[in-house]
Amino acid sequence: QTVSTEQQLLRMLQFDTLVCHPYRCVLIVMDTLDFGRGTKSQDQNHCLLSPRASEALIFKAWTILNEISIDVVLGTTILQYNVVTLACAVISVAAAANRSSGGNETLPDEWWRALDVPTDDFMSAAE
C-alpha cells in the first residue's frame, strides 16, 4: 500500500520532486503587493497594512499552512495548486479569519489577479 501511495503522489506531482514551499511565497506576495512584511521590516510607509496587521496576517497564513500540511488527506489535494495560487488563497483565508476575530485589515478586491492567479483556481484553493 505504501508503494501504491507513493506512485499516486508522484503522478500527482508529475514526477517533479523539486519542492517550492509556500511559506516564503507568502512573504514575497505580501511584499510584492505592498501589503507589508511585519514589524521587523524597515520601510513600511508605502504599505497597505500596518506593521502589526501585516505581521498578524503572515502569522495566521503560516499557521493555516502548518495545519494544512499536517492533514494528510487535505495535504494531497493542495498539491494540485501552484505555490503562488496557494499562497494567495492562504493570505485571503488568513485575512478573513483575522477580520472575524476583530481585525480590521481589508485587502483590495480581486488582488490576486495582479499576480496572474486565475480566479477559478484561487477560489478553489481558498475553500
Image (tube, grey):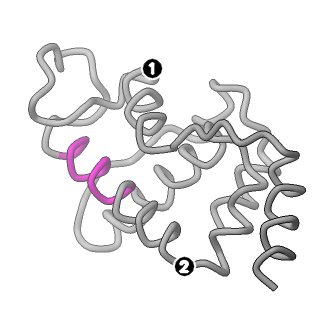
Q: Residue at x 52, y 69 (%)?
A: 68
Q: Residue at x 78, y 39 (%)?
A: 16
Residue under numbered circle 1: 32
Q: Residue at x 50, y 38 (%)?
A: 108
The picture quadrant where one finds residue 38 is top left
| Residue range of the region highlighted in magenta in the rendering | 53-61
Rounded to the nearest whole Å, what is the CA distance between mark 2 and mark 1? 29 Å
Q: Residue at x 87, y 67 (%)?
A: 8
Task: Tell me the crowding category of disc 2: few under 14, some 14 to 19, or many 20 or more residues within 10 angstroms, Cα based.
Answer: few
Quadrant including the C terminus: bottom right
Q: Estimate the x, y position of residue 116 in percent, counting from the top left.
A: 73, 27
Q: Estimate the x, y position of residue 32 in percent, counting from the top left.
A: 45, 20
State whether the magenta stretch is mostly helix, strand or loop.
helix
Mark in front: 2 vs 1: 2
Quadrant including the N terminus: bottom right
Q: Amino acid at mark 1?
A: Thr
- Tag 2 and tag 1, C-beta contact below 8 Å: no
Decide whether residue 80 is among the magenta residues: no
Q: Is residue 40 above or below residue 59?
A: above
| Apparent side of residue 50 relative to residue 80 in the rendered image (left or right) | left
Task: Tell me the crowding category of disc 1: few under 14, some 14 to 19, or many 20 or more residues within 10 angstroms, Cα based.
Answer: few
The picture quadrant where one finds residue 4 is bottom right
Residue under numbered circle 2: 71
Which residue reaches farthest bottom? 1
Closer to the camera in the image, 40 or 119: 40
Mark 2 or 1, nearer chain start: 1
Q: Amino acid at mark 2?
A: Asp
